[in-house]
Structures are given as structure tokens and as C-alpha cells.
């Protein structure tokens, strides 16, 4: 038995929420229907460290909890809307209910705009087009294909799954980089504290030695003076450099240069390439499964790739297909896909199951990216620890050399 947390609407328009035990989501939905509720949200709960059960991605208690609409908000909106549509709730009523339940004012306004547009006679995809920057071409075209085929609820389920997998992949990469980032920060802070607080404590001991002070000790004392006296200037220069760098990489030329250098890195470059290929494959496979044409699917999926050189290479695939070429041959020309990936795409074209093969390719590359990150961290973490140890040891040995020299002079 699994525990589920649900939110629903009664026939009189009032809201209800609670928890229940069920073998599956379908069983949970059936229990909610027996309670005469229209489900808005249904989430499986997990057992926390203390043994208490907590809802996964539980909603925030305040509608003012963060003004910016994030990807998770769009994912929650999609999940709630798909559940309500599959339960037989009309689209306009579902949008009205979700707008009333939104946890953020900004999201409530967006859903309210969608409801007003649909109520005014516009299609859902047309209503979404007014918020293109939020939902994107992928989302809008999937909805348009679902409307054309009369399968909007099923298409929204696929979109929700796509957004969830994309978030999991991104979160996995970010989580893997947290520990190395903390390690680097601790290393820099430790060196700074040694130079600015520990080394000056021994300066009075070394003052009388003059030129007799060992060179390593003199260098460490000088570095301590420099960092202690000019730390504010260094901080200002670092802040200015970070600001200038962010400004530069936001320009098309700067982003292209940065992405190109990233791809050229020995280990990280291959991981970035596989990560972007995973995004492209999953997006295109989901679009094809939703009924989007192959030319449009390639164009939209290519624009989900964040790396500029890779996206530029994939932009050449669409003209190749329009001329009658096979997608496997077009992808071969990009030089981005492995032989295994190209064979899977070619097999998908020959069997008419290209969408399935692309989704399977995304799953394979997803696992390779996660494994590659773990291997990279296995090498990076000891290297960072060793570097930190060498730097701190050099500072300590330099101080000890100075102390021993003082003892020699005193003797």
C-alpha cells in the first residue's frame, strides 16, 4: 500500500484535501471519485527521516511564497490540469479551479488569463501562445497536436512526464556539483584565513631576522600582508570581473565562445554533449509521440538545446529533412551522436517507431550522464582535497622554516 495526498473540488465548488492509502494512482483516483470529488492534485507521499510521512513536492502554504514563476510551477500546473481533464472536467472549469488554487499570485494571473481566453472562444494552444516565454514552443505545439487529435488530456500527461524527467536530469547534475563547489569554497576560505589571521601572529617573531628570513617564509608573510591590507580591493575586482563575465556570456558571441570552450574540456565536454543530446532526444521523442510532424519536432527539439554550437549544428537537420533526406543521415552530419545513437535512430525510422527509439536513447544517455558525473567526481574530489592539503602544508612548512631559523640565530 502506498500513501497519497490529494486535493479536490466538491460539487458545490468548495475545496477538500486529505490523504488515503492505495495500491496505485489509478486506485487512488477511484477512491477520490467515490468521495464525489473532482481531483486537482494527487501526490505520493514518502517516509521522512523521522518516520513521519511527508508529501512529495507539497504545496506552499502561502500564495506569496515567491513571485517568480519557475519550471516546477509549470510542471504542477500541467499535472493538475491533466488529472482534471482525465476525470472529465471541462477545460474552462479546470482552469478556473487551478487559478483559485495557485500558490503564487503570478501563476494565478497566468492561469486566469488562460481561462479568460478559453472562455472567450480561443483554443487552449492559442491561449498559451500569449505566454510563449513561459511555456515555450515545445509545450504549445504538444497542446496544439493534442487538440487536433482530440487527446489533450493524454498529451498533457506526456508533457508532464517530460517536464518531470527533464527536471530530474537537471537536478541530478546540480546536486552532483554541490559538494565540489562547497569544497572549493572551504579551501579558498581556509587559505584566506591562514594568510590574514594566522601568519600575522608570527610576524613579530620574524621582524628581527631581516634578509636572513627564508624565502618561502618571506613570501608567505608578504602574501599575508597583501591579502590583509588589500582584501577589499580584491573583493571589488572579483565582483567587477564576475559582473563583466555575466554580461559578456549573455551576448550571443560570449555565449557561443563559452559553450565552445566548455565542449573542448577533456571530460566535462563529453558529458555536456551527452546531456544536450539527451534533452534533444527526449524532446523530439515526446513531440513525435504527441503527433507533431517530424520537421516541426526537429526544429522545436533543437531549440531546447542550451549549448550554442550544438544547437547551431542541429539547426542544419531541418533543411536536410525538407530535401527528402533521412533523419539518421542528417544527425550523422552533425557529428554529435554516437554510433549506437545513430543506429537506434535508423532502426526507429525503418520500423516506424522513431519516437520510442528516441525516448529510449534519452534514457540510455541519461544513465550515461549520471554515471559520467559520478566518475568525474571520483577524480575531482580527491584532486581538490590534495590541492588544499598541499597549499595549507606549504603555508605551515614556511612558517616552521621561519621559526627554525629564529632558533638557529638565537643559538
Image: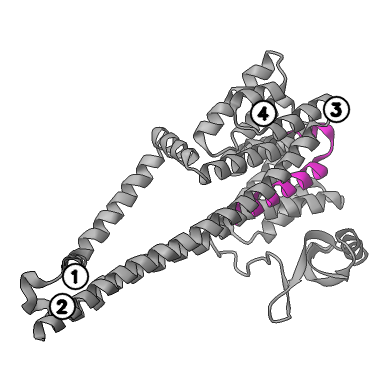
Q: Which percent across, then down, holds residue 174?
A: 55, 56
Q: Is residue 197 above or below residue 364?
A: below
Residue 121 position by quadrant: top right
Are the residues flagged by discs 1 and 2 in contact, CB closer than 8 Å? yes
| Quadrant placement of the N terminus | bottom right
Residue located 78% across and 50% down the image: 82
| Quadrant placement of the C terminus | bottom left
Residue for badge 2:
405
Residue for badge 3:
351
Are the residues flagged by discs 4 and 3 in contact, CB closer than 8 Å? no
Are the residues flagged by discs 3 and 2 in contact, CB closer than 8 Å? no
Residue located 20% across and 60% down the image: 233
User: Closer to the camera: disc 1 or disc 2?
Assistant: 2
Spatial CA distance of label 4 from label 3 is: 19 Å
Circle 1 residues within 10 Å: few <14, some 14–19, many ≥20: many
Circle 3 residues within 10 Å: few <14, some 14–19, many ≥20: few
Q: Secondary structure at mark 2?
A: helix
Circle 2 residues within 10 Å: few <14, some 14–19, many ≥20: some
- Furthest-top residue in view? 323
Q: Of callouts 3 and 2, which one flags the residue occurring earlier in the amino acid sequence?
A: 3
Q: Which mark is residue 217?
A: 1
Q: Of callouts 1 and 4, which one flags the residue occurring earlier in the amino acid sequence?
A: 1
Q: Secondary structure at mark 3?
A: helix
Spatial CA distance of label 2 from label 4 is: 71 Å
Q: Which mark is residue 298?
A: 4
Amino acid at each position: 500500500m502506498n500513501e497519497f495526498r490529494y486535493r479536490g473540488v466538491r460539487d458545490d465548488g468548495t475545496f477538500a484535501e486529505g490523504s488515503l492509502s492505495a495500491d496505485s494512482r489509478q486506485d487512488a483516483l477511484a477512491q477520490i471519485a467515490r468521495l464525489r470529488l473532482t481531483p486537482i492534485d494527487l501526490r505520493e507521499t514518502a517516509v521522512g527521516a523521522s518516520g513521519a510521512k511527508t508529501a512529495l513536492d507539497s504545496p506552499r502554504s502561502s500564495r506569496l511564497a515567491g513571485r517568480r514563476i519557475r519550471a516546477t510551477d509549470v510542471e504542477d500546473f500541467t499535472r493538475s490540469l491533466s488529472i482534471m481533464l482525465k476525470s472529465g472536467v471541462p477545460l474552462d472549469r479546470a482552469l478556473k479551479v487551478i487559478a483559485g488554487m495557485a500558490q503564487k499570485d503570478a501563476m494565478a494571473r497566468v492561469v486566469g488569463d488562460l481561462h479568460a481566453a478559453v472562455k472567450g472562444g480561443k483554443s487552449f494552444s492559442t491561449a498559451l501562445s500569449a505566454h510563449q516565454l513561459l511555456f515555450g514552443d515545445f509545450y504549445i505545439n504538444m497542446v496544439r497536436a493534442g487538440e487536433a487529435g482530440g487527446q489533450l488530456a493524454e498529451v498533457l500527461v506526456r508533457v508532464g512526464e517530460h517536464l518531470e524527467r527533464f527536471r530530474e536530469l537537471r537536478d541530478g547534475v546540480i546536486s552532483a556539483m554541490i559538494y565540489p563547489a562547497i569544497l572549493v569554497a572551504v579551501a579558498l576560505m581556509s587559505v584566506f584565513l591562514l594568510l590574514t589571521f594566522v601568519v600575522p601572529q608570527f610576524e613579530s617573531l620574524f621582524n628581527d631576522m631581516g634578509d636572513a628570513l627564508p624565502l618561502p617564509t618571506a613570501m608567505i608573510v608578504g602574501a599575508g600582508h597583501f591579502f590583509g591590507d588589500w582584501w577589499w580591493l580584491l573583493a571589488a575586482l572579483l565582483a567587477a570581473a564576475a559582473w563583466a563575465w555575466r554580461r559578456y556570456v549573455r551576448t550571443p558571441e560570449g555565449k557561443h565562445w563559452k559553450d565552445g570552450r566548455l565542449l573542448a574540456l577533456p571530460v566535462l565536454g563529453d558529458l555536456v554533449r551527452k546531456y544536450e543530446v539527451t534533452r534533444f532526444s527526449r524532446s523530439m521523442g515526446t513531440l513525435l509521440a504527441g503527433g507533431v510532424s517530424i520537421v516541426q519536432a526537429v526544429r522545436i527539439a533543437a531549440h531546447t538545446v542550451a549549448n550554442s554550437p550544438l544547437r547551431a549544428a542541429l539547426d542544419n537537420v531541418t533543411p536536410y529533412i525538407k530535401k527528402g533526406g533521412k533523419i539518421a543521415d542528417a544527425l550523422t552530419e552533425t557529428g554529435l551522436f554516437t554510433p549506437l545513437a545513430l543506429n537506434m535512430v535508423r532502426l526507429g525510422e525503418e520500423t516506424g517507431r522513431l519516437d520510442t527509439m528516441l525516448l529510449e536513447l534519452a534514457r540510455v544517455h541519461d544513465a550515461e550522464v549520471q554515471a559520467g558525473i559520478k566518475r568525474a567526481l571520483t577524480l575531482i574530489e580527491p584532486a581538490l582535497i590534495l590541492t588544499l592539503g598541499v597549499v595549507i602544508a606549504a603555508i605551515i612548512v614556511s612558517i616552521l622554516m621561519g621559526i627554525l631559523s629564529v632558533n638557529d640565530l638565537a643559538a
